[in-house]
Structure formats: C-alpha cells, structure tokens
Amino acid sequence: MTNSDGAELTSARHEELRRLFALLRRAGARHATSRPERLGPLVSSVLALACARTPEAGTEVLTAREVDVLALTAIGGRNRDTADHLGISPETVKSYLRSAMAKLDAHTRHAAVQVARERNVIP
C-alpha cells in the first residue's frame, strides 16, 4: 500500500466517523430521554472507530479514556450520561475532561472538543 492509499483510507474513515457522529447526534436528540439504551451500541461503535484514528503528528497524546470522554462530550453527552456509559463516576468524567483540556490547551469542554477535532483526535 502506498502513502496515497493510506491517506485515502484515513480520509474515508474520517468521513465515516463524521457520518456516524451526525447520526448519533440526531438519534440522541430523539431518544436520549425516552430510550437511551438504544444509543449504547451506536456509541460503542463510534468510540471504537474514533479510538482507532491516528492523531496528527506533534499532538500531545491523550489517553484512550480521555478520547472516549471527549467523543461522548462531542455528541452532546452530559457528564452523568458519559459516566453511566463508561461505568465511571461523574467526578471521574470531570477529571478526564480537565486533563484533556490541559493537554489540548483549551479552557472549556467545547473548546477541547473543537481542538480535538482539528487535530483529528475525534471526528
């Protein structure tokens, strides 16, 4: 496989992640309060694909859990929802967010999500 082939695969994966995140945001808006259990498999698939991504060179490495928390934050998840999905406490979610924000030099959770997207850490 050549470098250009690898770039095409990365681009295709990136577009697939964007599509899945958009689908997840729409589904979350419809089902978050009435049937949150329907989102579990979709969230798990998106997180698995997002964690397989290769961040840009020069990016400080986030832990897998920080990426998980940022990905769930990116789709509009509240700390309690993120904690429930990952099986951790809301305080632990806050800790992961603070750590990711520091690594990404972001002052808010929304800024951290934006920087992570710009650096190809999450879609």
Image (cartoon, helix red, strand yellow):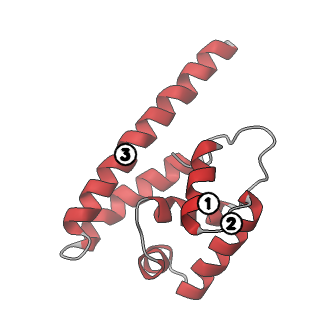
Which SS class for mark 1? helix
- Marks 3 and 2 sit apart, C-alpha to C-alpha, by 24 Å
Which SS class for mark 3? helix
The residue identified by callout 2 is 101
The residue under the point 61% across, 60% down is 112
User: Where on the picture, by quarter, is residue 63?
Assistant: bottom right
Which SS class for mark 2? helix
The residue under the point 36% across, 40% down is 19
The amino acid marked with disc number 2 is Met
The residue identified by callout 1 is 112
- Marks 1 and 3 sit apart, C-alpha to C-alpha, by 20 Å
Along the line of sight, which residue is nearer the eye, 16 or 30? 30
Mark 1 is surrounded, within 10 Å at the Cα level, by few (under 14), some (14 to 19) or many (20 or more) other residues, namely many
Tell whether label 2 touches label 1 (CB within 8 Å): yes
Q: Position of residue 118 (x, y in %)?
A: 61, 43
Mark 2 is surrounded, within 10 Å at the Cα level, by few (under 14), some (14 to 19) or many (20 or more) other residues, namely many
- Marks 1 and 2 sit apart, C-alpha to C-alpha, by 5 Å
Q: Position of residue 122 (x, y in %)?
A: 56, 49
The residue identified by callout 3 is 20
Mark 3 is surrounded, within 10 Å at the Cα level, by few (under 14), some (14 to 19) or many (20 or more) other residues, namely some
Going from N to C along the chain, the mark reached first, 3 or 2, is 3
